Image (spheres, rainbow, N blue to C red):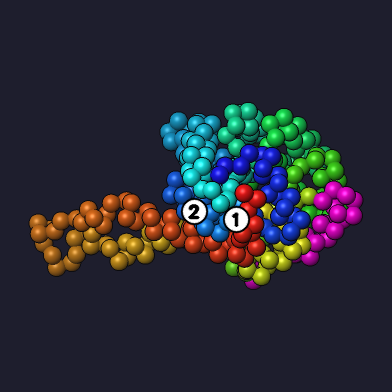
Amino acid sequence: MYFNGTELKKVFLKAKKERFGIIASNVVFDGTIRGLLQGYDNKKSDGLLQISSGACKYAAGDSKDLLVGAEFISSMVKVLAKQFKKSGVGLHIDHATPNYFEFIKDCVENGFVSSVMIDASKEEFEENVRITKEVVKLCKKHSVTVEGEIGYIKGTEDEIVSETELYTSPEEALEFVKQTGVDLFAASVGTNHGVTKGEKVVLRLDLIKEIDDLLIANNVETGIVLHGASGLTAEQQQTAVLNGVVKINKDTDYQLLTAQAVQAYWEKEKDAVVCPEGVNNEDYTPDKSRFDPRKWTIKAENAVQEQLESLVNITGSTGKSIV
Ligand SMILES: [Zn+2]
């Protein structure tokens, strides 16, 4: 089923209480959405699908109208999600920088999403707090969940390019949560956006626990979000969850698996579209039964589903749906 913001808050509260992690998956295409929804449902795990401004721009085609893209993806998610009865998903806007405030507002007021991330982490702390508070105020009216961010997460993401790695300080996290009232916040603990080899990541999972402990001691326990988690091992993700992470973002993983599944298909089935060597072009006919896009895009869909199912086993959300 499709979760509104109120239901989504319950999901994250349960995850925090019982210490399991919700996998948040970035989407654009219908096949990915289908594979993920099937995966969450097979595992009776709740989930979150995410759209970035880049995804919305892409989905809108030449119009480049972000709102058209958001409505299009939102409709697909809602219609498909209705078919699944053993789990639920919300739809979240990933990394909306302050210049996307109007976009957030339109999405929230039109009911396109149940959750948003305002990423004003490039601003000075006070300005980050001010902007995030404004988004919290707007979202509260519509019971939409809000995620904020403190400190940079290394790497490249839509409109976020940061060269330096800045770790979030527990004191700053406490101030941020107290002043903004966010439901979730992303902390920088040394993860990188994009795929990275494990050894290059200077991960500080202990910092998550330090932040979590401080928040609990001050009666403002809040869900922590882990970005740039595609390169982390299963064990690292489990430690992160035990230390207070309730949402783990996945994007690059799925992109790579999608490309690999399609590549493997065409390596084997190349002669369905390319005349094999030694055969006369006049004697060659492409094979529709193999080049029909449904025959090969399903491979990507299945790969993404399989990956999601193994991810929810790792983060412990299997069987934990509030449905
Ligand atoms: Zn991120």
* Count of residue discs: 2
Q: Position of residue 261 (x, y in %)?
A: 41, 61
Quadrant that contains the N terminus:
top right
Task: Say what secondary structure mark 2 lies in.
Answer: helix
Q: Magenta residues: mostly which secondary structure?
A: helix
Q: Give yes or no for residue 272 being in the magenta stretch.
A: no
Magenta segment, which residues?
A: 199-221
Task: Return the residue at label 1.
Answer: 45
Q: Residue at x 50, y 31 (%)?
A: 68
Q: Is residue 74 above or below residue 42?
A: above
Is 202 inside the magenta-drawn segment? Answer: yes
Res 111 quadrant in image: top right
Which residue is depicted at the point 72% across and 53% down? 14
Out of 236 and 79, give the one closest to the viewer.
Answer: 79
Amino acid type indicated by mark 2: Gln
- Residue under label 2: 38
